[in-house]
Image (cartoon, grey):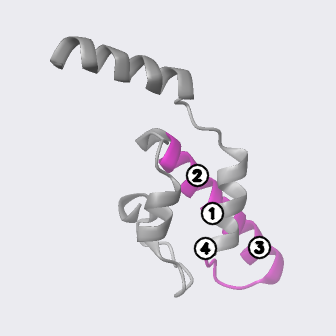
Amino acid sequence: LKRHFGDAAREPEMDLGQWAEALEGFTGSDVAGIVHAAKRLALGRAVASDCEPLVTNADLESARKRVPSSITVSMLQEFERFKAQRFG
């Protein structure tokens, strides 16, 4: 998550560890899309308010709802079957 945020300002209350857990099951590309969408939300708010952009937990939550996971439950189940057959 830190890599995708770069130097974008985040609210101090943001716990990246909790967000990492909340985004379990999302691919790295999915996470990048979520963070970038959250940064766009913060930027839009900053432009409208004439202030510096600050990414909030609400921005991440909103972005998470809009960016779907590219991994489905059936894909995970298929992987688990493959892993069990291949590696025991």
Mark 3 or mark 4, which has the lower sequence index? 3
Q: Residues within 10 Å of mark 2 (few under 14, many from 20)?
A: many
Q: Residues within 10 Å of mark 4 (few under 14, many from 20)?
A: many
Q: Residues within 10 Å of mark 3 (few under 14, many from 20)?
A: some
Q: Nearer the viewer, mark 3 or mark 4?
A: 4
Q: Are marks 2 and 3 in contact (CB under 8 Å)?
A: no
Q: Which residue is mark 1?
A: 60
Q: Are marks 3 and 4 in contact (CB under 8 Å)?
A: no
Tell me the residue at 45%/59% (across/down): 21
Q: Report, in whole angstroms, how far the alpha carbon at label 2 lies from the one at label 3.
A: 17 Å
Mark 1 or mark 3, which has the lower sequence index? 3
Q: Report, in whole angstroms, how far the alpha carbon at label 3 lies from the one at label 4.
A: 10 Å
Q: Amino acid at mark 3?
A: Arg
Position above or below: 14 against 62: below
Tally the marks.
4
Mark 2 or mark 3, which has the lower sequence index? 2
Asked if residue 54 lies in the magenta stretch, the reply is yes
Q: Report, in whole angstroms, how far the alpha carbon at label 1 lies from the one at label 4.
A: 8 Å
Q: Is residue 72 visible?
A: no
Q: Amino acid at mark 4?
A: Val
Q: Nearer the viewer, mark 1 or mark 3?
A: 1
Farthest right residue? 48
Q: Which mark is residue 86?
A: none
Q: Is residue 19 visible?
A: yes
Q: Which residues are magenta?
A: 30-55
Q: Which mark is residue 34?
A: 2
Q: Nearer the viewer, residue 24 or 35?
A: 24
Q: Amino acid at mark 1?
A: Leu
**Main SS, magenta residues:** helix
Image quadrant where one finds the N terminus: bottom left
Q: Position of residue 60 (x, y in %)?
A: 63, 63
Q: Which mark is residue 45?
A: 3
